[in-house]
Amino acid sequence: YMKTLLKIELERAFRNKWLYITLFIELVLVIVDVSTVAIPARRAYEEFYIPLRDYQIPGAYCFWMLVHNSSIYKLCHFLFPLLISIPYVSTIYSDIKGNYIYNITSRTNKKNYYISKLITQFIVGMTVVAFSLISSFILTAAVLPLEHPTKASAEYPLSVQKAFPQLFYNHPLIAVIIFIILESVIFGIIGCIGFVFAYLLNNMIMVILSTFIIYYMDFILSNLYGRYGCLMTASKIAILHKEWIMGLVIELIIIIVVELVACMIMINKKDII
């Protein structure tokens, strides 16, 4: 029954109009990014790069928003916790308030229900973030050629202080795939924070905002205490600093533990209908 329940929850998530509204918002942001970064770079080929350059001409790898760290990418990173919460977190809250949860748990193990909700939220979070990163790379590559990045050109921000410079310069396409997977997984984990607060709060808007609030509080507190590898900055995997890796891993482990503990508490809680 676990597979059936997971299938039902995934269908609820991927048939939800808010998922597609969220993806549309992301697509608009990606198009703005390509229009303001990649297209001007393409125009500069004829005017500057080709006639004047005799070394590396930057292309899609350079101007892809993850590597370029554009203003739209920074905005996306600010909004991701909200965007990954909008499509599905509200259904977790409405299941409780509408007593749908009791209808399901009366026919199956509570463990199946809660785990399927947690997995679905993780998948939704991953999907929302992966969509923006993949669409950004595809549209950037449609405008600019896929060059082979060179460290000597000084066009790329992946210095030796970053986490993955060798991978990027030796195997750029593999690096792109890994960056997308890692960043999507990170926000999949972060998105499950809303799963916890759906059972703690009595206001749907606050439930949807809970992940964003925790994420932004982490940013503020990290800066106040002089620790700059907060979730908002460290989750930018392409330009992640080496010294931030341990802090990011610890924060993610703490989030996972809290989410799993909350899930276990809800599984073992005696319901009062």
Image (cartoon, rainbow, N blue to C red):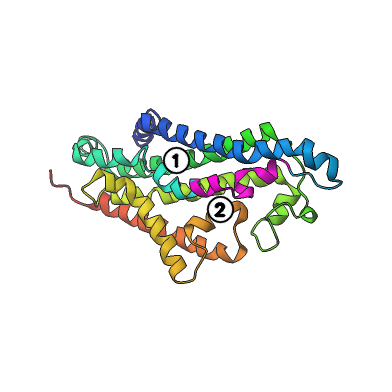
- Please tell me which residue is depicted at 45% across the width and 61% down the height of the picture: 251
Q: CA distance from mark 1 to mark 2?
A: 19 Å
What residue did someone put label 2 on?
236
Question: At numbered mark 2, what does the secondary structure look like: helix, strand or loop?
Answer: loop
Which residue range is magenta in the image? 59-75
Q: Is residue 72 above or below residue 107?
A: below
Position of residue 153 in the picture relative to residue 250 (left or right): right
- Please tell me which residue is depicted at 36% across the width and 40% down the height of the picture: 86
Residue 175 position in % (x across, y down): 66, 47
- Please tell me which residue is depicted at 65% across the width and 60% down the height of the picture: 162
Q: Do residues under tags 1 and 2 come within 8 Å of each other at their CB atoms?
A: no
In depth, the one of 141 and 250 nearer the eye is 141
Q: Amino acid at mark 2?
A: Lys
Residue 84 visible in rendering:
no
Residue furthest out toward the bottom = 225
What residue did someone put label 1 on?
123
